Image (cartoon, grey):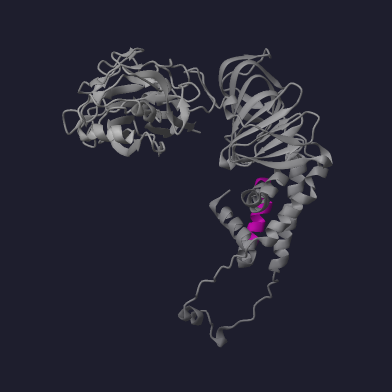
């Protein structure tokens, strides 16, 4: 299509009455010159004008247009003339707002220049005028006729078409002797594929991505539809490919700009779990179809012999969303647990509970050097044994400036502290003192046991810096969206303060306040590449704080720190609860 033809079609779709007769003749001539031109005009005038508009403005229209009556795998003339479909098109056209185009003002002197003197007027041959309205009707009638011809002809030409590519696979074992390999093109006439083990990633030509998890049987039906006989798959559809369909033995799931997972049992029952956006779920057959919308965070199940769908708990983590055969990485939508990394893990559960980092050396440890408070070491300490932890340090000790990462970045944000610390930085949430029994810590009454509720214990005057670039290198295809956590001083402090005898201690104002108020206060900090994004004091008697900050792809270092407040560092049993890096697909 040339720039000129695009301009003419745009004029026609915008306001036919604004076109000149010459432009109308030119458009009509261009349409009839070549069948390819006709196809382009039909696609623009019918699809883009009607169908696309409805897709963007009406959920009901999406469901109507995109259900099984419009798929190339089983389309027929009767289903094509769906009354609801044409009613929606007519309604869209009837309710579309009129667009008024002002005619350009013509300077008065040009009007006079166009008037010829009377004596120069000559008798000319009569030119037969073409009625613009009739011409436009002819264009539309011709276009509609050709559209139907091409549409019904296309029903018989959907076979043997390459519509997708197997872009990756991991530990894949196929049932067929001629199993597809990476970069193989998949065709619409391909027999069903059986994936016995492993994972396969398929990208359709419209950029829709499907990750299939074995055991599964599936079949590519068209450029925007896949059939799942049994197994699991996860679909990521870009906005421009909205309308992608997953067919199962008893239902169809129609994308409305989403990410979703589908599981089909060997008996034919179907589960739909929507992670983002919304989908249309069509169950049943013939006139008994049941169409509903399913939104993000919701899930439905359709039994094999049932028309109705039932609500079930949404579990997006059950689906493999992204695979990478080079790093042998499978991502199921889980986030990175920084507590797990402190425990020597990869962020996905491989860390060891109660393992942590010894403050003076940076080495992994399980044991307390002492149960008492003691002076921390100055300077920045690297953690070479853990690629995801850049280093640890005692903030505000001995200088107005504190180094917070390995590239030498310093900050003066921290106040001067005593440098007194307890224990080590722990994957878990507990405290044990010389007169305090070992027990799990709490925030807002929730006990953090390190398993169901993971946490990082960091007594006041401790800090840790994570290397996000190292994590990104291990997570191809996945990006870090944000950091989130609750934080505070354990509610259990009150119990032990009430039982503590302070008479043998120095009666400084800070100690007196601690003994009188029965609560401890600490100050919590978060930095991104040395830029402070959180500074907040929280006491053991107050509600826990919540941090949720976006993390740009350029950010390398995330620093978490706890410092003492104005009531000494005693009883600052501080923790970051559920500290996570929130991930999303880079696609």
Depth check, front residue: 69 or 277 = 277
Percent from the top left, x then y, of residue 99?
59, 65
User: Outermost residue, left direction?
Assistant: 399
Depth check, front residue: 5 or 561 = 561
Locate residue 549: give its quadrant. Answer: top left
Taking the image as drawn, is residue 141 in sight? yes
Locate residue 428: give its quadrant. Answer: top left
Percent from the top left, x then y, of residue 228?
70, 27
Vertical arrangement, residue 546 with respect to residue 92, above or below: above
Magenta range is 25-36
Percent from the top left, x then y, of residue 393?
26, 24
| Left or right of residue 5: residue 414 | left
User: Chief secondary structure of the magenta span?
Assistant: helix
Percent from the top left, x then y, of residue 464?
31, 25
Depth check, front residue: 180 or 92 = 92
Q: Give the residue at x 67% y 49%.
A: 51
| Left or right of residue 535: residue 282 | right
Q: Give the residue at x 29% y 27%.
A: 463
Vertical arrangement, residue 82 with respect to residue 216, above or below: below
Depth check, front residue: 174 or 229 = 229
């Amino acid at each position: 299509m040339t720039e000129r033809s695009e301009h003419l079609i745009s004029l026609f779709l915008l306001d036919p009455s604004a076109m000149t007769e010459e432009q109308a003749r030119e458009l009509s001539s261009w349409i009839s010159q070549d069948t390819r031109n006709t196809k382009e005009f039909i696609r623009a005038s019918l699809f883009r004008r009607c169908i696309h508009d409805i897709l963007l403005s009406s959920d009901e229209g999406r469901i109507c247009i995109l259900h099984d009556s419009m798929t190339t795998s089983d389309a027929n003339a009767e289903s094509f003339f769906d009354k609801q479909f044409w009613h929606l098109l007519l309604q869209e056209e009837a309710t579309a707002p009129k667009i008024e185009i002002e005619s350009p003002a013509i300077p008065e002197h040009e009007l006079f220049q166009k008037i010829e003197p009377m004596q120069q007027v000559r008798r000319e041959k009569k030119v037969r005028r073409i009625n613009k309205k009739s011409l436009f009707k002819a264009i539309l009638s011709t276009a509609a006729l050709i559209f139907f011809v091409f549409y019904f002809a296309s029903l018989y030409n959907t076979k043997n078409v390459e519509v997708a590519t197997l872009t990756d696979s991991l530990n894949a074992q196929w049932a067929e002797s001629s199993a597809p390999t990476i970069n193989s093109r998949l065709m619409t006439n391909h027999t069903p594929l059986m994936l016995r083990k492993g994972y396969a990633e398929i990208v359709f030509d419209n950029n829709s991505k499907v990750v299939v998890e074995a055991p599964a049987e599936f079949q590519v039906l068209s450029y925007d539809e896949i059939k799942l006989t049994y197994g699991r798959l996860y679909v990521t559809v870009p906005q421009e490919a909205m309308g992608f369909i997953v067919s199962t033995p008893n239902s169809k799931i129609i994308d409305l700009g989403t990410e979703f997972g589908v599981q089909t049992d060997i008996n034919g029952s179907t589960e739909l779990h929507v992670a983002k956006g919304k989908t249309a779920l069509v169950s049943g057959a013939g006139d008994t179809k049941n169409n509903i919308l399913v939104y993000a965070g919701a899930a439905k199940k359709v039994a094999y012999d049932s028309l109705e769908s039932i609500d079930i708990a949404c579990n997006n983590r059950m689906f493999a969303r992204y695979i990478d055969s080079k790093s042998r990485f499978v991502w199921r939508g889980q986030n990175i647990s920084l507590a797990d990394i402190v425990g020597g893990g990869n962020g996905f559960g491989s860390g060891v509970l109660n393992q942590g980092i010894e403050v003076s050396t940076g080495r992994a440890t399980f044991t307390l050097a002492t149960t008492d408070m003691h002076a921390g070491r100055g300077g920045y300490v690297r953690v070479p044994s853990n690629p995801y932890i850049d280093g640890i340090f005692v903030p505000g000790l001995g200088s107005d400036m504190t180094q917070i990462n390995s590239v030498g970045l310093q900050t003066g944000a921290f106040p001067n502290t005593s440098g007194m610390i307890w224990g080590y930085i722990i994957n878990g949430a507990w405290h044990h003192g010389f007169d305090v029994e070992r027990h799990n810590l709490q925030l807002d009454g929730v006990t953090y046991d390190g398993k169901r509720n993971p946490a990082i214990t960091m007594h006041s005057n401790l800090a840790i810096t994570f290397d996000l670039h190292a994590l990104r290198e291990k997570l191809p295809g996945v990006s870090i969206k944000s950091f989130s956590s609750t934080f505070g001083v354990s509610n259990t402090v009150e119990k032990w303060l009430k039982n503590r005898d302070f008479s043998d201690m120095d009666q400084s104002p800070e100690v007196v306040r601690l003994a009188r108020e029965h609560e401890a206060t600490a100050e919590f900090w978060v930095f991104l590449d040395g830029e402070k994004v959180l500074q907040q004091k929280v006491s053991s008697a107050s509600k826990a704080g919540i941090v949720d900050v976006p993390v740009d792809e350029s950010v390398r270092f995330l620093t978490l720190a706890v410092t003492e407040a104005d009531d000494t560092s005693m009883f600052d049993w501080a923790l970051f609860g559920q500290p996570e890096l929130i991930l999303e697909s880079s696609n």
